[in-house]
Image (spheres, grey):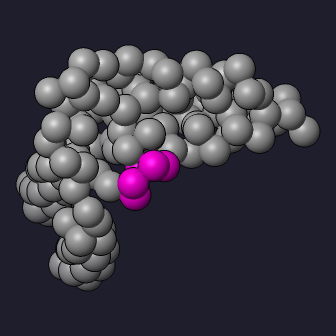
Amino acid sequence: MKGLWITLGWLFVALGVLGVFLPLLPTTPFLLLAAFAFDRGSERMHRWLLGHATLGPPIRQWQEQRSISRRAKIYATLSLAGVFSLSLAMQVPRWALVAQLSILLLVGVVLWTRPETPIALSTERETGKPA
């Protein structure tokens, strides 16, 4: 069973890293799933992920404070708008646009109602140095 969790962890890490470069693919949710999977499959990989200079801070912010940085919220909102704009450009059927817009608005509301990581803490977590 540990092998399955480790495999899932690496799959989610790969999807999360792709999300850094692909605007329509979310990064943080996949990294949270990777942390969850690694926590069940490999303590060493879980520590590696949480300690990673780039991938670790948003996971730790969520685990420790259930907060999301303003920067992440802005990027996520731009991605949501990009997805909907792409659907408009592709002339997706009206019923699908309404369904998609409803879901994207719900995601946006959930996103923006989460607490924000304090700027000083966010900066410290990202750089490893006190603000």
Residue 44, position in %: x, y?
Answer: 71, 20
Q: Residue 125's image quarter?
A: top left
Residue 54 forms part of the magenta stretch: no
Q: Quadrant of the C terminus?
A: top left
Task: Residue at 35%, 21% (x, y): give it.
Answer: 54
Asked if residue 78 shows in the view, the reply is yes
Q: Residue 43's image quarter?
A: top right
Compared with 42, 65 (above or below) is below
The span shown in magenta is 62-66
Q: Main secondary structure of the magenta part?
A: helix
Task: Residue at 78%, 34% (x, y): give it.
Answer: 41
Out of 1 and 69, give the one closest to the viewer: 69
Compared with 13, 106 (above or below) is below
Residue that sits furthest to the right in the current view: 1
Lateral position of residue 99 relative to residue 2, left or right: left
Task: Residue at 54%, 25% (x, y): give it.
Answer: 49
Residue 63 forms part of the magenta stretch: yes
